[in-house]
Amino acid sequence: MAVREILLLGDEVLRRKADSVVEFDTDLQTLVDDLFDTMYDAEGAGLAAPQVGVSLRVFVFDVREIMEDANARLALVIPEIVTASDENVRDVEGCLSIPGIEETVQRPASITARGMTPDGEEVEISGDGLLSRVIQHELDHLNGVLFIDRLSPLKRQLLLKRYQKSRTGGD
């Protein structure tokens, strides 16, 4: 198990649709363990494999501190959303690949997702609130979508300028 480098906005792997997992082996389990270690080290709520430079459809999340739900910590392999509520909610999101930037994003209030565990067992999870938001955010990463892509063009442009200034030390 190891803490891996988290790629930042601008890295091309963050904009690619991740490849499907074909082997449920020790390499996959090592990746999942490293994703958890990296996420905890960065104090995040979720982390997708592309964020550490691995273009595979895998992500992890842990929101147990906020939600009293045993399902609030999981690794999902080849995940998909099977249902999403018609009701949308707005809440603030950030991203470990765009540090220091947060903005309000609208997403479905609740979802049901299906995927596999790293052992190859099918799993289905339903949730609302933070659990729903984190799953949707991480699944976006597997499709090359960042939370800033869900903002208006003007808001996205302003945030990108602020992000660039923070990276270059500009005023």
Image: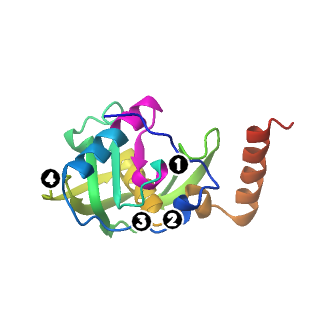
Residue at numbered disc 2: 144
Q: Dot 3, how many residues are within 10 Å of its Cα: few (below 14), some (14-19), or many (20+)?
A: many
Q: Secondary structure at mark 4?
A: loop
Residue at figure coordinates x 36%, y 42% from the top left: 35
Marks 1 and 2 sit apart, C-alpha to C-alpha, by 21 Å
Instruction: Look at label 2 and name its amino acid.
Output: Gly
Instruction: Look at label 3 and name its amino acid.
Output: Ala
- Residues marked 1 and 2 touching at CB (< 8 Å): no
Which of the two residues, 170 or 25, is positioned nearer the viewer here?
25
The earlier-in-sequence mark between 4 and 3 is 3
Q: Secondary structure at mark 3?
A: loop
- The image shows residue 108 at horizontal and vertical percentages of 43, 62
Residue at figure coordinates x 68%, y 64% from the top left: 152
Marks 4 and 3 sit apart, C-alpha to C-alpha, by 19 Å
Horizontal side of 1 relative to 40 (left or right) equals left
- The image shows residue 128 at horizontal and vertical percentages of 34, 52
The earlier-in-sequence mark between 4 and 2 is 4
Q: Which mark is residue 91?
A: 1
Q: Is residue 78 visible?
A: yes
